[in-house]
Amino acid sequence: MRWLWLLTFGACAPHTDGAVAPKRSASRASLDLIRAYPDADKIFVQARLPDGSDAVFLVDTGAGISTVSADVAERLNLKVTDGGYVEGVAGRSAWRKSRLPWLSLGGMVFEQVDVAVDVDGAPESAGFIPVDGIIGNNVWGRVTLVVDYPADRLEIAVPGEIPVPPNAQPMGFDGAHASVYVKAFAGEQNGPPVERTLLLEVDTGAHGVMLSGGTGVGFESVSTIGEEPILGIGAADLVPVSAFYRRTRRVPLQAVELGGARVEDLKPATWINFEGAAYTIGPQGMPGLIGYSALQDHRVSFHFAEGRFAMNPSEGPPSAENGHERMLQQELKEHGKDASRALIRGKYLIALEREDEAIAELTTATTQPDDHDEARSLLARVLLSRGDHAAWETQLKALSPAALVEQSEIVALVNGLGLAGRAQEGLSLARAATEASPEEAEAWLARSDAELALGDTAAARRALNTAARLLQNPDADLKRRARIARAEGDRLGALAHLRHRLTLYPSDGEALWFYALTVMEPGLESHRPTFNADLDRAMARLHPEARPLDFVIAALHLVGRGGVETERLMKIGLARDCEPIEDASSKDNCVAWYMAMGGSAEDEALALIRGAVAAKPHRSDYLDTLAIVLLGRGELAEAAQASAAAARLAPDRFYHLWQTERLGALASNAALK
């Protein structure tokens, strides 16, 4: 979990009303790992709590302390007191402390487990699987921990019960973090490696490799410098992502060696705190960590008591289970087809892409008073994914305006009505939503979109300003502001908003593209040098592999900077973004999209995207690609039609509103000539 440090943790007494721990504890246990989908990087396990319930926890050897959600603390009636701060890579987060009387993992009982309660940045779900907390090293450090990633199995045992593998290496453990020496080979794949031995924490809650401070010294010559958001523990939900952009280095890795194993084909390591001696990101003194990308193909052993760590081949058999299937089977075994739990089953079935069964369960759930609103929201989304606009609208219209806001459906329904030619009806609904939920920014976003659809730009701006005030973010929704400015004929205002958005989010390819499209309009020639400088500056701020190459290619093509450079970027983008895709239609869509963005809308691109749309006719991204390919071929009416179809399938996406408006105007103007 990228270093979960406790800055304050005093003693706290357990609540005396907790259930008594089982008298016997097994000396060894084997448990199934749970993942949101096969090969997901986050691994979870179920633990029995004092109230007899089974809770899902993240397995996190990067966390020095375990955590529980506020719901768990309330349900168990835990005594909760102020605890100071926890510190993660993203920053500090105030927290509250408590103590679990006990928890059980596969029959092994752990008593008096200190926990942090309701920590910002801690996972709340894995897909549709509710996550109740994190199990950290104040639990794992009491036992031997073995994680067999390919087999999706976790083993724990009292120290000495599981033999230390012969290839194990020394591991330091300070009671909170487990660290090992890692030999790293850095540099581009075809070049000579820079070899260094690093002391890193082994972190099952992290994805890749992170270096901090002096740990990365020596890799300067093979690394790039850029900005990227650093998220995790300490990242508050209401703070805009732009606040977490940090300057980092990225170090390409040819291989690493640890635990007696050599691992290749790793993504670049992220190196933070590389400028000077100060630790401006994360806890003071954090050396770095190594996570899932290096561990995923191995059976990983943490022998905490013996101070040894090993990585060996899996003992199998290999697993490719979707954790939602396991949770669904448990649900059916424990509760059968209880109508009051239909919503839970429906969610699992959505994740398993068993749509017919999901629709049946969600339909049942709509009859349950406590689940009615959420069930209708989910049911509507499933129906829309099938292209059934009428059924989608019927389900959402059964919700009150306040419920639409609470379920994050108000923007979709208001814009869906507008796209269907019923903008006045959409505005009436949006006004009702702002009256019912005046303190919810989403209601005002819907109100702004509805006002703009009917041409009242002043009202649209007022509503958008209200949303920004409620979000406490003066830079909120800059692309919407740009669209309003354009509607007023204030193209310079639109450019200013898009420039500011690109400054805050240099990786926002959509903002870059809309900026390029606007600056290339007649009369704005004098602003094109500024655009070119902004484009180059934004891309220079990003690491090469983080650049939105599809939109960069489109922008370069629009402003006349195509040619050799766009051909080079096209090759890189196709290899990076399209080649790894396994699904045939998705890969065809990706290739056709890149071709269209580069100005190549030949028959090949059209054939690829028509095949993809035929295979999956209700994918908004496929239809959007079709629209751009048709636009490049000069088939404006057909392009506008495809864009409108895409927008109706994803009416909550601002991108589609702008695109449909743009292509519709082009088609209308062409028809008048």
Image (cartoon, rainbow, N blue to C red):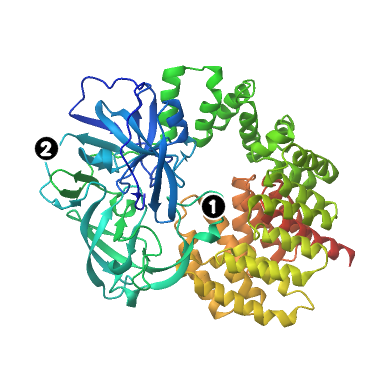
- Which label is found at residue 460? none
Query: Mark 2 or mark 1, which is nearer the start of the sequence?
Result: 2
Inspect this view and state whether residue 122 appears.
no
**Residue 461 placement (x, y as % from top left):** 78, 57
Binning the other alpha carbons within 10 Å of mark 2 as few (below 14), some (14 to 19) or many (20 upward) gives few
Q: Which residue is drawn at 32% across and 47% down?
A: 204
Amino acid type of the residue that numbered disc 1 sits on in the rendered structure: Ser
Inspect this view and state whether residue 423 appears.
yes
Q: In which quarter of the image is residue 225?
A: bottom left
In the rendered structure, the answer to whether residue 334 lies left or right of residue 522 reads left
Residue farthest toward the right in the current orientation of the protein: 672
**Residue 293 placement (x, y as % from top left):** 33, 54
Binning the other alpha carbons within 10 Å of mark 1 as few (below 14), some (14 to 19) or many (20 upward) gives many
Front one among 48 and 75: 75
Q: Which type of secondary structure does the marked residue at label 2 adopt?
A: loop
State the residue position of label 1. 586
Amino acid type of the residue that numbered disc 2 sits on in the rendered structure: Gly
Say if 369 sits above or below 175 in the image: above
Q: Quadrant of residue 101?
A: top left
Q: Which type of secondary structure does the marked residue at label 1 adopt?
A: helix
- Which label is found at residue 160? 2
In the rendered structure, the answer to whether residue 171 lies left or right of residue 413 reads left
